[in-house]
């Protein structure tokens, strides 16, 4: 009896694998349609929300020492760790501060680029006209 059950299980497993391989083979053989357009309509649709997110992130990064996530607050934390003699904490926070400072020019450039995209979208019916 155990041999019959094992045989049936093995046959069922082989059939399942064959079915999966057959389906994968036919899907791979089917040519996919090339992408159409450059996605301008989708970019124009998302641009206002992306602009708002960038504005919010820059406001947070440029905030004062009381603003969570700001460069000023992290600078203060680095100074506090240094004055307390916690060199490992200071190193860790200083690395985070370096990264956070590098975000500001990156986000400013993205904001500038996105403003140009918004102008283009307005002039081109939100990416639907050619």
Image (cartoon, grey):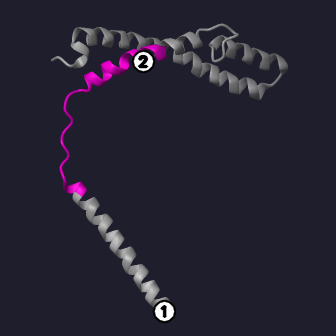
Q: Position of residue 27 (x, y in %)?
A: 24, 55
Q: Nearer the viewer, residue 72 or 8?
A: 8
Q: Residue at x 69, y 9 (%)?
A: 65
Q: Nearer the viewer, residue 2 or 96?
A: 2
* Residue denoted by label 1: 1
Neighbourhood count class around disc 1 (C-alpha, 10 Å): few under 14, some 14–19, many 20 upward: few
**Disc 1 on helix, strand or loop?**
loop
Q: Nearer the viewer, residue 121 or 61?
A: 121
The numbered mark, 1 or 2, whose residue comes first in the sequence reads 1
**Disc 2 on helix, strand or loop?**
helix
Q: Is residue 88 above or below residue 15?
A: above
* Residue denoted by label 2: 49
Q: Residue at x 38, y 76 (%)?
A: 12
Q: Position of residue 44 (x, y in %)?
A: 31, 18
Q: Is residue 125 above or below residue 93?
A: above
Q: Residue 19 occupies which quadrant of the picture?
A: bottom left
- The rendered magenta stretch, by its main secondary structure, is classed as helix
In the image, the segment drawn in magenta is 27-54
Q: Nearer the viewer, residue 15 or 1?
A: 1
Nearer the observer: mark 1 or 2; the answer is 1
Q: Is 21 on the left-hand or right-hand side of 33?
A: right
Q: Residue at x 19, y 39 (%)?
A: 34
Task: Tell whether position 61 is magenta.
Answer: no
Q: Position of residue 75 (x, y in %)?
A: 69, 14
Quarter placement of the C terminus: top left
Q: Residue at x 20, y 46 (%)?
A: 32
Res. 53 mark: none
Neighbourhood count class around disc 2 (C-alpha, 10 Å): few under 14, some 14–19, many 20 upward: few
Q: Position of residue 33 (x, y in %)?
A: 18, 42
Q: Is 18 on the left-hand or right-hand side of 29?
A: right
């Amino acid at each position: 009896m155990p041999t019959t059950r094992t045989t049936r299980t093995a046959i069922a497993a082989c059939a399942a694998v064959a079915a999966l391989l057959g389906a994968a083979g036919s899907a791979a053989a089917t040519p996919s349609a090339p992408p159409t357009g450059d996605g301008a309509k989708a970019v124009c649709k998302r641009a206002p929300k992306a602009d708002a997110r960038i504005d919010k992130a820059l406001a947070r990064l440029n905030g004062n020492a009381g603003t969570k996530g700001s460069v000023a607050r992290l600078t203060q934390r680095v100074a506090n760790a240094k004055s307390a003699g916690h060199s490992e904490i200071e190193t860790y926070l200083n690395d985070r501060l370096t990264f956070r400072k590098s975000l500001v020019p990156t986000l400013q450039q993205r904001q500038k680029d996105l403003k140009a995209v918004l102008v283009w979208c307005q002039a081109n019916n939100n990416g639907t006209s050619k």
